[in-house]
Image (cartoon, rainbow, N blue to C red):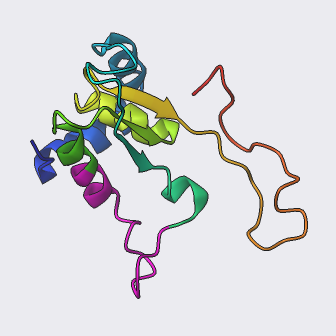
Amino acid sequence: MSLDHGRYRELIDARVFSPDSFATALVSRRRRPIAGPDGRLIIIAADHTARGKISLGSNPLAMADRFTLLDRLVRCLAMPEVDGVLASADVLEELAWLGALNDKLAIGTMNRGGIIGATWELDDRLTAYDTSHV
């Protein structure tokens, strides 16, 4: 399973013209128990962009391409060995809308507004989602 450009265009159109369809996709997706049959979990970490971590090697924007990010996540989540994904709420919404979260764990992140290297980096507030809205 992969994401093609036509389906990605539909997703963008849905964001603009049918934003409620994302909440519907999240609520109606098939759920699963937390632990799988072997008691282990493989969770894909995909919250890098929400934390401003978008560079890879010498490419400062390697992970900034939304299509590529979603395509890779859809491919990973299609693997039976992968149990779920850790991502920001917007990415989880889009993966649910694409049908990639059926029978997978969806773990939402709540990111801080700290500036890396600032003296107050760890003493700051959450800037986006809280537990009841992830």
Is residue 91 left or right of 108 when viewed as pictured? left
In the rendered view, would you say 55 is above or below 100? Answer: below
Look at the image and give the residue range highlighted in magenta.
Answer: 54-72
Q: Position of residue 132 (x, y in %)?
A: 65, 19
Q: Position of residue 25 (x, y in %)?
A: 33, 20
Q: Position of residue 18 (x, y in %)?
A: 35, 27
The residue at the point 43 percent across, 48 percent down is 45
Magenta stretch encompasses residue 108: no
Q: State the residue in front, 39 or 5.
A: 39
The residue at the point 31 percent across, 56 percent down is 69
Q: Quadrant of the C terminus?
A: top right
The residue at the point 34 percent across, 57 percent down is 66
Is residue 41 left or right of 7 when viewed as pictured? right
In the rendered view, would you say 17 is above or below 20? Answer: below
Query: Which image quadrant for residue 62?
Result: bottom left
Q: Position of residue 115 (x, y in %)?
A: 76, 66
